[in-house]
Image (cartoon, grey):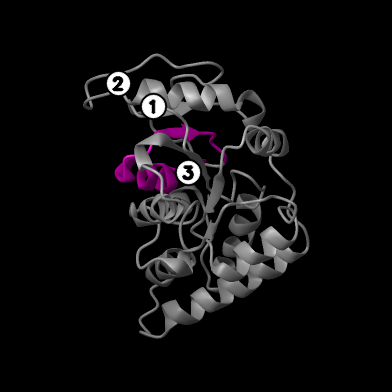
Amino acid sequence: MSDLAAVLFDMDGTLVDTEGLWWRVTEELAASLGHRLGPADAPEVVGRAVEDTAAHLARVTGTTDPAAPAALAEALGAAFLTRVEEGTPLRPGAQALLTALEAEGVPFALVSASPRTVVDSVTRGALGHVPFALTLSADDVARTKPHPEPYLAAAGLLGVPIEHCVAVEDSPDGAASAEAAGCPLLVVPSLLPVPPSPRRRFADSLAEVDPPALRAWVTAASAIAGPDRTAPAPGCVREA
């Protein structure tokens, strides 16, 4: 089989424009601790789980209290949920791509590193009309992104081979998670650049992507036997 079995979407920064909200929430909490958030912090903030970012803030502010990371994670999660509930616009092209996949009968799932409370808030709001086959949050797995478990779990729950799915991501950690799981990957970067690799294809916007291009990428990716082999970028997705 060399067809598109399912599409596995990241949420924050990929389908909904929430990465900026997450950055601002983290920036405000960092400032309250006397730390000015900057580019050096970005890899520990963008695309990371709440607990990872909280642990980073504890480190960079020299917090030694062992209870601090958990308290910071709770504060970050609560503040982010408040911002999300105020409204989360869809990313350009997201609605058209989801509608096209539904029309062609291609199942799609949400695979997020955000907590279940945030995922549920978004799927009640901006994505409330979207018929996801399943939604997976950081709370639903033992190890979240950049570990491969979220994508492996999603494919397993859908009952489809991971190599016949396409993951759609915007961040380096999300891309690493999908690639480690063995999933062909489409990257639509948001706040951070994502490095290229043979099993990654790139688009500037979801508006450039359609189901035939995703299907063609699954077929092309199946021909890649190792890290030194590449396949031509199909349809409207391009190589880095």
Give the label, 3 or 2, closer to the camera: 2
Crowding at dot 3, Cα within 10 Å, few <14 / some 14-19 / many 20+, comes out as many
Residue 32 appearing in the image: no
Quarter of the figure that contains the C terminus: top left
Residue at 71% over, 70% down: 82
Q: Where 219 sits versus 165, above or below?
A: above
Q: Among all residues in the image, which is located at the extreme right? A: 86
Disc 1 to disc 2, how far (Cα)? 10 Å
Crowding at dot 1, Cα within 10 Å, few <14 / some 14-19 / many 20+, comes out as some
Which residues lie in the magenta part? 167-190
Circle 3: element type: loop
Q: Position of residue 52 (x, y in %)?
A: 41, 64
Q: Nearer the viewer, residue 91 or 232?
A: 232
Which amino acid, mark 1?
Ser
Is 139 situated left or right of 180 in this image?
right
- Confirm or deny contact between disc 1 and disc 2 (CB under 8 A): no
Q: Which residue is mark 2?
A: 223
- Confirm or deny contact between disc 3 and disc 1 (CB under 8 A): no
Q: Position of residue 154 (x, y in %)?
A: 44, 53
> Residue 171 bears which disc, if any?
3
Which amino acid, mark 3?
Ser
Circle 1: element type: loop
Q: Nearer the viewer, residue 132 or 195?
A: 132
Circle 2: element type: loop
Crowding at dot 2, Cα within 10 Å, few <14 / some 14-19 / many 20+, comes out as few
Q: Which residue is mark 1?
A: 2
